[in-house]
Amino acid sequence: MASNNTYQLDPGPLDPSVLTEQLTHRSRDIWIGNDNMILNTRKCDGKFWDLVNEHPIHPRVLDVIRLSGLYGVYRSHRPVVDRSLITSLVERWRPETHTFHFKTGEATITLQDVEILYGLPMKDTSGGLLKLMYLPMLEDITAVGSYSWGSATLAFLYRFLCKASQSTQNEIAGFLPLLQIWVWERVTVLRPQIVAQRDTRNIFPVGLPRGLHAARWFAHFSWTNTTKHVLRVFRDALDSMTEDQFIWEPYSVDLIESLPDYCRVGRDIWRARVPIFCWDVVEVHLPDRVMRQFGLVQEITSPFPFDATHFHHDRQGRPNTNWELEHAQWLPFWNHIDQYVCNAPIIHGSLRYDDPYLIWFRRITRFVIGNPTSRPQQLQGYVPNATAYETMARHIHLMVNKAISLGDNPSMEEFYIFRAMVRDEGSNCLTRGKGGVAGRRVRAVERGRALIEMGDEDQAT
């Protein structure tokens, strides 16, 4: 009978034609309960900022930094990177599409984000080939600012996101402050509340140009309504994220126009569907998959012809390789970048649930990362939202199966028994639904305890 069926949640994808590498993706291990590891974050700039805090940079060196095109990175300082937050994002990164797969659709870090947040330049103004080696580019300091640092930075970050998404990996590198600030700009349930800007007079001398957009996150935060350093909270927040909790366009027209010229000089190629390079690294920038980030209609996209396992290839054992020749098949895309800019009609309002793109996306995506059936629901502490939703689905499924088993003409006794069941199961749904970050406040009030507002140095919630 139907009432004996066991309800099971299928995390997807129902259609495996897009996410072809699911068997090696870390989300598979998480689902079967084998992986709850927080990634190590590799960084090499910690001593630099310690030195800057103690000894302000000499004005002549600042002039060189400004000429290099890297002033925005320096002026925005370095936020404390939350390894748990980064890990929760990696769990949703797909190397097949170079996008994060959220419940609301695909999203990614684009050339627009790199330039607006950090002012990193987008291409060689000479129109020549993209420079692929670091040290030779520093020989003429007056030309350094014309190099495409933005696309190189993004390519390098893409590469390490792709690598870290594999179940065999335990670390991630790349420009992680960009990733963290990107998600703070867009996902409202993950961002801290800015209380006040930090005093930077001892770090940045008077007279320097103001900071880029990313600099607003060099601040004092309140964590009352969100959390930090807790992977399962971040994972659950993304598992249960709703459309109104994701900001598709955080950069208004007025904001963009208020930025320095070098933060928008590359706006004509922000939507270019092209390969991007960083030495041996070749990745693909696919804005056509995230057109809602540009205020445009999202359609079902065609795949870009690149190897989904590209991130397995590196420069180890190839010290004398000429990367310009190695990447010859891809360089013409970048050298004629204006021909590959994607366009679409302006979008008005949010997508309907039955929009063709969302119907397609729901079939090809991995909806849920955390497995509700493997989470102990009787333990005290944080109760995940996704678990609560799964519990409600199970109760509703039970009631539907019972109603089907009664048929069209139940007896009065059966009817009263069923009514009691609906009452009890509905009550259980509501009781078990106090999950997630919002539920912390409810449970604290029930216990007669006020939530503690945490400072920047607190390590856990």
Image (cartoon, helix red, strand yellow):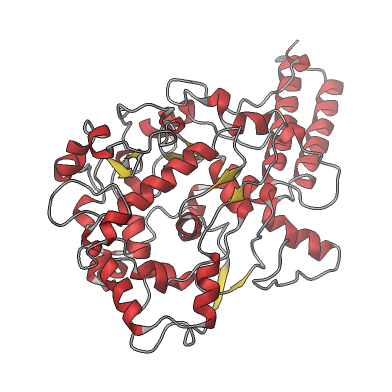
In the rendered view, does 94 fall on the left or right side of 168?
left
**Is any atom of residue 105 visible in this view?**
no
**Is any atom of residue 292 visible in this view?**
yes
- Single out the residue that lies furthest toward the top: 1
Q: State the residue in front, 31 or 200.
A: 200
- Single out the residue that lies furthest toward the front: 320
Q: Position of residue 186 (x, y in %)?
A: 46, 56
When the figure is inspected, residue 15 is found, relative to residue 236, above or below; the finding is above
Q: Position of residue 375 (x, y in %)?
A: 77, 38
Q: Position of residue 57 (x, y in %)?
A: 42, 80
In the rendered view, does 409 fall on the left or right side of 83?
right
Measuring 60% from the left and 58% from the top, which residue is drawn there?
A: 82
Measuring 39% from the left and 42% from the top, which residue is drawn there?
A: 351
In the rendered view, does 282 fall on the left or right side of 460?
left
When the figure is inspected, residue 328 is found, relative to residue 144, above or below; the finding is above
Measuring 47% from the left and 51% from the top, which residue is drawn there?
A: 174
Of the 4 image quadrants, the one containing the C terminus is: bottom right
Q: State the residue in front, 322 or 244.
A: 322
Of the 4 image quadrants, the one containing the N terminus is: top right
When the figure is inspected, residue 321 is found, relative to residue 49, above or below; the finding is above
Measuring 22% from the left and 64% from the top, which residue is drawn there?
A: 140
Q: Where is residue 241 in the image (x, y as percent from the top left)?
A: 56, 47
Q: State the residue in front, 440 or 411.
A: 440
Query: Quarter-wise, where is residue 2 in the image?
Result: top right
